[in-house]
Amino acid sequence: MIEQADVVAVHEAALRVLERTGVLVHDTAAVALLRAHGARADGRRVFIGEGAVRAALAVAPSSFTLIGRSPARDVRFGDGHAVFGSCSGPAYVLDGDRARPGTLGDLEATIKLGHVSSSIEYHGDSVELLDLPEERRTLRGTHARLVLSDKASEWVATTDDDLDVAVAAHEILFGAAWNEVPRGLIILNTSSPLQITSETARLLVRWARLGQPTCITSCVMGGTTGPATPAGVLVVQHAEVLAALVLSQAAGAGSPFIYGGLSTMASLRTGAALFGTPEFARMAVASVRLAHHCGLPVRAGAAVTDAHVPDAQAAAESLRGLASAVRAGADFVFQAAGILSAFNVVSLEKFVLDDEMLAGQSALERPVRTNREDLAEDVIAEIGPAGSYLSAGHTRAHARDHDRSTFLARDALEKWTDGGGVDARRAAAGEVARRLEAFTPPDDLDPLVRRQLDKLCLV
């Protein structure tokens, strides 16, 4: 979808934009920090030369491990393995065929579903807690993610107070020296076109100084917040992320940094961002290639759709947005489960349907083994032409290799019909209920740690 020569052309164009056009950085301390590292500034407009970009790329790690609550929960970014993260951000939840405001109970349900998933390694901040006062939402969401799962999770970061919570929680969990290794990944966004808000700049600088990883995501909309051509969109995206990279490395040289590309084209009839279209998938592939050209781990793609219910459109668009990024080599696929309505709605049924898709995608990426056992020449010779392999010892030894548990239809037509002819969406609703009923929370938190987390968050 994008050749190496085109990757280089976009990269070089972005460098020229940074040097000649610049970016607006809406924080005076961040502007001063960039100037101290070689940038030129005219008020809040900062012009970053190629040398500063090269210097930042030279110290930013190409891979890192996010250290978990146990070694089994460590998450590796940048080694060719796609890390799947669940959903984040919507204000609404699908209830039947209608969307309603999200609640704490909805957040807890997504955490439970993500915890029992064998594919999801990183919990997103799945839904706004609109049943709680705004000042309590970050605390209660943080508490739910920490006590209902021991997997890595998103640290909500929109204000300085949010980072205060993250620091305090990490100290409770891991002690005063918690930040000696990467522990908490926060996700921040640029503001297109070519801006870094004061909040993003402050949070990025503070977290990088703690040596902690940030994923800076640009979401340019072609025709509205970026040029009306895919290449032009990519130039703006690349310039924004590289500017954030320079700022992060100026604050904390060597702090882990994930390149985030979530750009797409907008409808010039309605102005809406189109995430279910092939252009979104094309941008995901290009984002992976641009980040890897720079030697950075990359977030790209998502199981996202413009559809409003978990139907055939939702399945097709979600698979395209996910698979294109995975096949291109994305290191982090966030928003990989449960998203509808172009990031505006969460569906628990789609969450488990997407989870099935994630497991299938992982299986699809496994290489075909060609050792002696797998080539099976001895068995082929023994069975010969027109024989049956069903009773062979080799078959018994490998009978469960590809036997994956699923709630999706795998029975013959007659058995499926006799069972009521349940379609995928109805089957998913049943699976949601079964998984929530079977959920068991982790028991790794020391009672004192749990009491301290309760005191921090349940105010």
Image: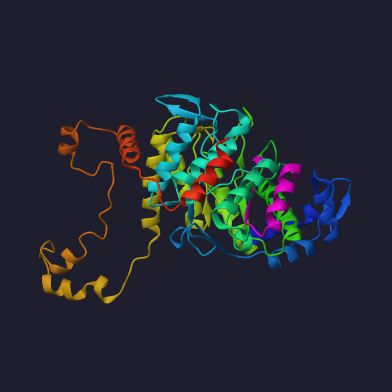
Along the line of sight, the residue nearer the viewer: 135 or 431: 135
Q: Is residue 196 magenta?
A: yes
Along the line of sight, the residue nearer the viewer: 50 or 359: 359
**Which quadrant of the rendered structure holds the N terminus?**
bottom right
Q: Name the spot of residue 27 as percent of width and height, x first.
A: 80, 45
Q: Is residue 156 magenta?
A: no
Give the extent of the magenta segment: 195-221
Residue under the image location 74 percent in, 45 percent down:
196
Tally of marks:
0
Query: 55 left or right of 110?
Result: right
Query: 402 left or right of 154?
Result: left
Residue under the image location 36 percent in, 51 percent down:
360
Q: Name the spot of residue 171 as percent of width and height, x first.
A: 60, 53
Residue 193 position (above or below residue 118): above
Residue under the image location 48 percent in, 61 percent down:
81
Q: Name the spot of residue 322 as percent of width and height, x first.
A: 47, 48
Residue 320 position (above or below residue 98): below
Query: 63 left or right of 445?
Result: right
- Image quadrant of residue 60? bottom right
Residue 221 shows up from this direction = yes
Along the line of sight, the residue nearer the viewer: 126 or 269: 126
Residue 70 position (above or below residue 130): below
- Image quadrant of residue 350? top left
Residue under the image location 52 percent in, 35 percent down:
127
**Which quadrant of the rendered structure holds the C terminus?**
top right
Q: Name the spot of residue 55 as percent of width and height, x first.
A: 75, 66
Query: 32 left or right of 3?
Result: right
Residue 321 shows up from this direction = no
